[in-house]
Amino acid sequence: MKAVWDFFQNEILGMQWLNRLISTALNYCGLDTSSRIGGSIRFFIYDTIKIMILLGVLILIISYIQSFFPPERTKKILGRFHGIWANIIAALLGTVTPFCSCSSIPLFIGFTSAGLPLGVTFSFLISSPMVDLGSLVLLMSIFGWKVAVVYVLLGLVIAVAGGTLIEKLHLQNQVEEFIRNGRSLDVPQDELHFKDRLKYAWEQVVATAKKVFPYVLIGVGIGAIIHNWIPEEFIVKILGDNNSLGVVLATIAGVPMYADIFGTIPIAEALLAKGALLGVVLSFMMAVTTLSLPSMIMLRKAVKPKLLGIFISICTVGIIVVGYFFNAIQNIII
């Protein structure tokens, strides 16, 4: 059973066959892949192709699932639950929505305008970019299933706890007035057939690939530089065991960036290979996908500074706690 799983993780998800194929092709062309330049080119080509293939397959599957949960249907589902169960369902529904926080904010605004509890909508907003189904599969391809499952579970905990806390603080007056006074039209959704859902899913693949591709190239480029040009001793010194503030630094470093899980994977992969601690790498990924500066600017249009500050504080503390937790169990889980 272990052999079957290892094959699935390494050859199907990790696409090691592709890595070997690219290495062979580059060596045949006279490029030494063990050199810095050759290694950088191999890393860039391999990770770009691998991520785009995974991206296409994942978005096709997830968008097909998402076609069953248009905003109005999602609103009705969430409206049936109360208390912490509503937060849990909202966090789970967030896993089948688009991959970046900027894509989730319009849905958050729609749910809030429709009158859903503020804490429930924030549970959705936190989980949507942080723990989508795509992150589960991609993390499995790099770190293994244990890390992927724990990452998603802890992300859902942050989403549920954060939304519950915001609800308890009674911050409804911190939402901008035009959203509080807005109303969502209850437009009935036409029943879609298999071909319609498949067409919708394929359109999402094309649209998302066009949007994400530049960030994938940037992320893979940064990963190639880290992987082949930055000394391992430097990474270990800054983000390894010797620096107790590595998780905090990684979280802060992730905030100014804008990317989704696909853009952060190659950077995370390169950092881990160079000796960065697991918790540091995952904290960086969470911060980039959840607290990116462009997303916070968009969210500021919907909520007032106090609520925005509380949201950022909850996510930051949660990400840092998760990071130190992974550092503590790294030897057990990998």
Image: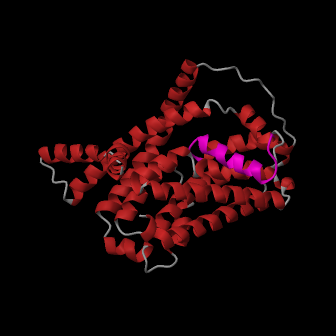
Magenta-colored span: 80-100
- Taking the spot 27% from the left edge, 55% from the top edge, the residue there is 40
Q: Is residue 165 at least partly visible in the picture?
A: yes
Left or right: 222 in relation to 209: left
For the C terminus, give its image quadrant. bottom left
> Where residue 32 sits: x, y (%)?
15, 54
From the viewer's perspective, is residue 255 above or below residue 303? Answer: below
Picture quarter containing residue 273?
A: bottom left
- Taking the spot 54% from the left edge, 19% from the top edge, the residue there is 195
User: Is 276 in the magenta?
Assistant: no
Q: Nearer the viewer, residue 7 or 109?
A: 7
- Taking the spot 44% from the left edge, 35% from the top edge, the residue there is 56
From the viewer's perspective, is residue 88 above or below residue 64? Answer: below
User: Is 98 in the magenta?
Assistant: yes
Left or right: 87 in relation to 246: right
- Taking the spot 82% from the left edge, 48% from the top edge, the residue there is 82
From the viewer's perspective, is residue 74 above or below residue 89? Answer: above
Left or right: 77 in relation to 34: right
Q: Main secondary structure of the magenta part?
A: helix
